[in-house]
Amino acid sequence: MTDQPSDQPSTPPASATPQPRNPLHGVTLEAMVVALQQYFGWDDLASRIPVRCFQSDPSVASSLKFLRKTPWARAKIESLYLFMLREQRRSAR
């Protein structure tokens, strides 16, 4: 092998591609759950997304375990997180 540059342009991996218009980019599921719990509280979160991990003895750990296995519930969390961000921006005006 030689150390000469390749004729093909080097492209970063897809995971390294910047996503400036995606508010979920770089936000972990744990950060979303913690932010939602702080903003809404467990009771309001359970009424908005009625799943047992929010209703019965709720914790971040049990929520993460459930949400990582359940795509539909994770999608609801992501949607509610985006709603929360919009509400925070509106109230900051």
Image: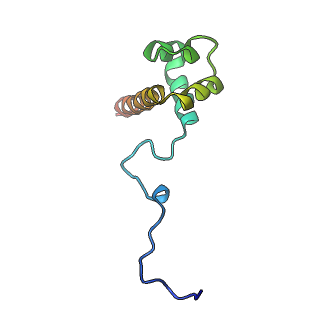
Q: How is the image coloured?
A: rainbow
Towards the viewer: 45 or 90? 45
Could you say which quadrant of the image residue 81 lies in?
A: top left
Q: Looking at the image, which residue is at 50% across and 46% down?
A: 26
Could you say which quadrant of the image residue 91 lies in?
A: top left
13 to the left or right of 65? left
Q: Looking at the image, which residue is at 43% across and 16% down?
A: 48
In the rendering, at what x and y percent does residue 51 appear?
51, 16
Q: Quadrant of the C terminus?
A: top left
Towards the viewer: 90 or 22? 22
57 to the left or right of 73? right
In the rendering, at what x and y percent does residue 58 appear?
61, 17
Could you say which quadrant of the image residue 54 lies in?
A: top right
Q: Quadrant of the N terminus?
A: bottom right
In the rendering, at what x and y percent does residue 56 appear?
60, 11
Residue 63's place in the image compared with 28, above or below, is above
